[in-house]
Amino acid sequence: MKHRAALALAVLSLAPFASFGLAPAAQDAAAPAPVSAAVAPSTITLDPVHSMAVFRIQHLGAGYFWGRFNGLSGTAAWPLDDTAAPTFDVVAEVKNVDTGSDKLDGNLQGPNFFNQAEFPTIAFKSTSARRVGERRYAVTGDLTLRGVTKSIEADCVVTGIGKGPLGQKVGFECTFTLNRSDYGMKWGIDAPKGALGNEVKMIIALEGDVAKAKN
Amino acid sequence: MSEIAQYILSVVVIPAAVAAVVALPFALRPLRDVRVAAEAGVACALMAAFVVSFTNELGWNAVVRQFVEIPGDDAPFERWHRVGTTALFLGAAAWGVAFLRGGAVRSRAAVGVAAALLAAIAAAVLVRFPGASLPSQLTLAALAIGSMLGFASVARRVMLWAGWLVFGLLAFLSGEGGFASLAVMCGATSAACFFVGVARAIVALGAEISAAAKRDAEGGERPPAFDAAPRGVAAPIALGTLAAVVAVCGHSYNATEIPAGFWHAAVLLPFLVLVADIAVRPSVMRHRRILGFSALLLGAAVLVAGYAVWRAQATDPAPSTDRELLDMYGG
């Protein structure tokens, strides 16, 4: 009984902070239900140090090979009370591809793959979204890769709302799969046959700073 | 056959074999006695190797979409595809140059020089890769002229072997620069130079034996032997221009930042024959082909060794394990 009372007291003491997203642990574990009064979407400036895209592709029909793009930049918008879907405008720079091997990074930046010299960035801009669960959305948007723009749907989750030294931070994780041949990146699919898979799984981890409201 | 072997067959061996088959009739009678055909045939065959490799690697759409929109084709236009178009034009232009030179008996040399200059200027004006600037285009033109001069005069006697090594080195540098497609196309051209060189050497050897037998049987003067080196300027113009364009292309897309000097040295390799000629000319005039070829081989080996040393020195510093507090906490 004594323990329950202490727990209730602790929960009550955190409640005011939780509504403003200042208690990360509680936010992650049990996200609050959307409130009825809609709040304007907060503009979130992506933090390149903590935003990255990880990709996975099959090598020689055998293992899955992972690489990542470091330093994603751009913006997102989302009302912190989850009353509307997030929007994203994200850019990755091809020069930031990182596989752990300089030589492989060079190959991926070359014309056979991302062609960094001609297409230095990869961009995603969301166009619509539908809610599929609490803090979870199917986000549709235009992915521009190697100068080709195609619509894709990503499964996006709000991973948490936290507080950093400079203010509130929000995290998202989006997952989708694409066929690289759709973007003219065909080397290794048919010639040499099966050197690399066509299907690429992408996991985009985003973290950004919530813009402070102007008085 | 493994997938990789099939790939190499498709983009290197078959294009080189096509070149050898196309070039062979121009080494045999009656075509080898037709000046225009003898001059243009080899150049056309060597360019065909590059074009066949290009189209086997990327498909004809990669050439066609540079000129017209293809219905249902949403693949991006990429500037480096100009190398395929360059080879295609050079193969066709070889016939034009040979016809003009064939018709201009008195000013044959002038037509050759004009054609070489035109090829260099056209390459500099029409073939622009990412980051192109006036200095880079002037470099392209200068490299093309230098390379043509190297193939046409300095290394004429060993032209096909010089082509074999120049494009072999360009293939090596392209591969090292993360540009597999360009590497296989250069590899195909290099192999084509080798195959055509071997075929012409065999024909020349046959002609030599036949001439000697004829002289022994009939007496009199020894008939002129067949020269294994291609005649005229069409082949040097095609090889020199393509080598320069490939080198500038490879350097422009070079993600691993191989210094431009390696690319330029590969293109200008034929000039080593001149060095060898000057160094030992008085004593071994009868062995100039072997001497020239040895100089080329030595130069290629030195370039690869120099590259290996550069690569060993150009290692990135180990990534720092210290992370700033702000990075950790999101400043």
Image (cartoon, grey):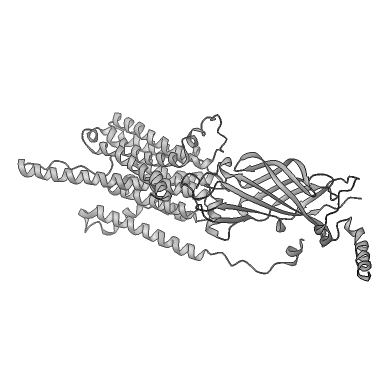
Residue B2 position, x and y percent, is 40, 50
Which residue is depicted at the point 29% across and 54% down?
A: B293
Q: Is residue A142 above or below residue B268?
A: above
Q: B291 or B318, which is in the foreground?
A: B318
Q: Is residue A72 above or below residue A85?
A: below
| Observer able to see residue B146 | no
Q: Is residue A32 above or below residue B130?
A: below
* Residue furthest bottom in the image: A2
Position of the C terminus of chain B, as image quadrant, is bottom right
Residue B5 position, x and y percent, is 39, 50
Q: Horizontal placement of A71 versus A185: left or right?
A: right
Residue B221: name its quadrant: top left
| Observer able to see residue A28 | yes
Q: B163 or B105, which is in the foreground?
A: B163
Q: Horizontal placement of A27 versus B198: left or right?
A: right
Q: A30 or B76, which is in the foreground?
A: A30
Which residue is depicted at the point 57% across and 35% down?
A: B74
Q: Horizontal placement of B219 versus A79: left or right?
A: left
Which residue is depicted at the point 70% across and 41% down?
A: A141
Residue B188 position, x and y percent, is 38, 46
